[in-house]
Image (cartoon, grey):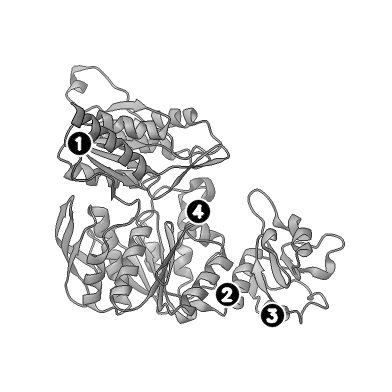
Amino acid sequence: MTIGELLAGLQGAAAPLGAMPQGIGDTRAAGVVYDSRRSSPGCVFVALRGQQADAAAFAPQALSRGAAVVVAEGDPPAGLENAWVSVGDARLALAQLADRFYGHPSGSLAVVGITGTNGKTTTAYLLRSIFEAAGRPCGLMGTVVYGIAGEERAAARTTPEAPDVQAMLREMADRRCEAAVMEVSSHALALRRVDGVEFAAAVFTNLTRDHLDFHGDMEGYATAKRRLFELLPPGAPGVVNVDDPRAATFLRLAGRPVTYGLRQPADVTAQDVSLTLQGLAFSARTPRGPLQIRSPLVGRPNVYNILAAVAASVSLDVPVDAIEQGVAALGGVPGRFQLASTGADDVTAIVDYAHTDDALRNLLETVRSLAPGRVVAVFGCGGDRDRSKRPLMAAVAARLSDVVVVTSDNPRSEDPAAIIEDVLRGMPAVERSAARRAERVPEVHTIPDRREAIEGAIDLCRAGDVVVIAGKGHEKYQVIGERVLKFDDVQAAQDALARRRARQRVT
C-alpha cells in the first residue's frame, strides 16, 4: 500500500484539511507510528497532542529518522510544508490509519470488548477460557498480559495505542486465532485507541469511582465507557450488568441488549449460589437453558464476572458445554484474589488488585463472609492519581477490617507520608464513650515501606486470620519518584509467611 492509498482512507474529522504534499503519495507505506523514536524510512508519523506535550514538536526528529509524512493537527512549522498533512483529529487519524495499514484484522476475528471499573480482567480471562474450550483459539489483550496463540507478553497498559492494538489483532489473525478478548479502558475509549476495531460484542461490568483525575467527574467517566457501545456494529450484542445504576444508558445504546445480574430481572442470572474459600457453584439461567457452573474463583464479585462471560458467550452462540468447561478450567487470575499462602501456613494471605473504594469493599466483604478469624487489610493509594478516593478507601477498610495497615502503593512523585495522611482522614475517629466501646473499632497501623507493611501485617496475625494485601495485584514493580523498583506483593507475602513458619518451628 502506498502512502497516498493509506491517507485516502482518512474520513470524517480525520480527513486531510488540505491537499496532500506532492512527491510522497507513491511512497510505499512502511508503518504508522505515534512515537518519533519509532520512526523508520517510509513510515507515517502521527503527532498526538497529549496532556503534557504536543508530539508535533518532535516532527523534525521523526523526519530525520526517515518518516515520509507527518499527520498532525494544526499548520506545519516553516520548512516542513512538503511533508505535512493537517487533520482535525489526529487521534482519529491514527486509529483509521492503523486499521487500514494492518488490513482491518478485527474483521476476521470475533472481538469481544469489555469495559467497566471492576471485573474486566477476570471476565476477559473467563471468556478466553470459554472460547478455547469451544476449540476456538483466542487472543487476549488486557491489564495483566497480551496473549497470542499460547504466547503471553507482559502488558504495558490495559489498552495500548491504536497501532499497537491493530498490530496485535493482525498477529492474532495471522496466527490462526478465531476470537480475541479485549479489556477496553476508559482512557482508550476517550483517546480513540479502539476506533476502527470491529467488535462482535461488548460487555459493561459496572461503573464506580475511578480515574477522575483524567475524566473530571463521574459523568465524563461514564461518557467514555459508553463509547464502546457506540462503536458496536448494528445487531452485535451489548452485554450489560443490569444491577448497575447506570445500566439503562448502556442498554439504550445496545442494538441487541443482553442483560445479566443477581438483583434485577435479567436474561442471565444465578440461582442456588454456593460460596466458599475454595470456590463457588451455582446454576446459571440463560435464554438457552440452565448451565451448571463450578469454579475455583472466590466470592460474589466473581459470580458477576462469570455471569458476564456466560451472557457474552451465550449471545455469540458458544456451545453450552464449552461454557461450563471453560469456566471450570480457569483456576485463577494473577493478582485477583490470588492466594499467597499454603496449607502449611496458619493464616491465609490474599493478594488483589483492588485499588478503588468499591473494589476494596467487594474484596473485604467477600473475605469477611468467609474468614474463620480476623480480617487484616493492607493497602495504600497511588500518587499523582485521583486523591478523592483516598479517604473513601480508608472508610471501607475501617468498616470491614479488624486490623488496618496503611502503606504505600505507587507514590510516584508524591510524598508517601502525605498520601498516607490523605488516607487517614477517612478513618473514623475513635470515641471512648461506653456506647462506642461496644462497637468494633479497627486497630490501625501506618507503615510506609510496603514490604515492611506486609511483613508487619502477617506478624500481627493470629492463627486463622486472613490478610488481604490490596492495590497492586499482578504488578511486579513499585514506582517511587522517578525510580521503578522490582516489587511483587505475592513474593513479599510468601517471604513473610516463610519467616513466620520458621519462627513457629523454633518456638
Q: Which mark is residue 202?
A: none
Q: Looking at the image, which residue sits at the far left?
A: 272
Within 10 Å of disc 2 (Cα), the crowding (few <14, some 14-19, many 20+) is many
What amino acid is found at the position of numbered circle 1 in the picture?
A: Asp
Q: Is residue 68 left or right of residue 444?
A: right
| Disc nearest the viewer among 2 and 3 | 2
- Using the image, determine if residue 194 lies above or below residue 398: below
Amino acid type of the residue that numbered disc 4 sits on in the rendered structure: Gly
Pointer 4 and pointer 1: residues touching (CB < 8 Å)? no
Left or right of 429? Residue 85 is: right
Q: Secondary structure at mark 4?
A: helix
Q: Would you name the residue on which mark 3 appears?
A: 8
Q: Where residue 507 sits: x, y (%)?
A: 18, 26
Is the residue under label 1 in contact with that under label 3 (CB below 8 Å)?
no
Indicate the amino acid at tag 2: Asp
Q: Nearer the viewer, mark 4 or mark 1?
A: 1
- Real-space Cα distance between discs 2 and 3? 13 Å
Residue pictured at 66% horizontal, 64% vertical: 90
Q: Mark 4 sits on what residue?
A: 220
Tag 1 near tag 2, CB within 8 Å: no
Judging by the rendered image, the residue that carries numbered circle 1 is: 465
Measure how far apart labels 4 and 1 are at the Cα level. 41 Å
Q: Seen from this angle, which residue lies furthest top? A: 433
Give me the disc on residue 99.
2
Q: Residue at x 23, y 47 (%)?
A: 366
Label 1, residues with CA under 10 Å away: few <14, some 14-19, many ≥20: many
Outermost residue toward the front? 506
Q: Earlier in the sequence, mark 4 or mark 3?
A: 3
Of residues 310 and 506, the one nearer the viewer is 506
Q: Nearer the viewer, mark 2 or mark 4?
A: 2
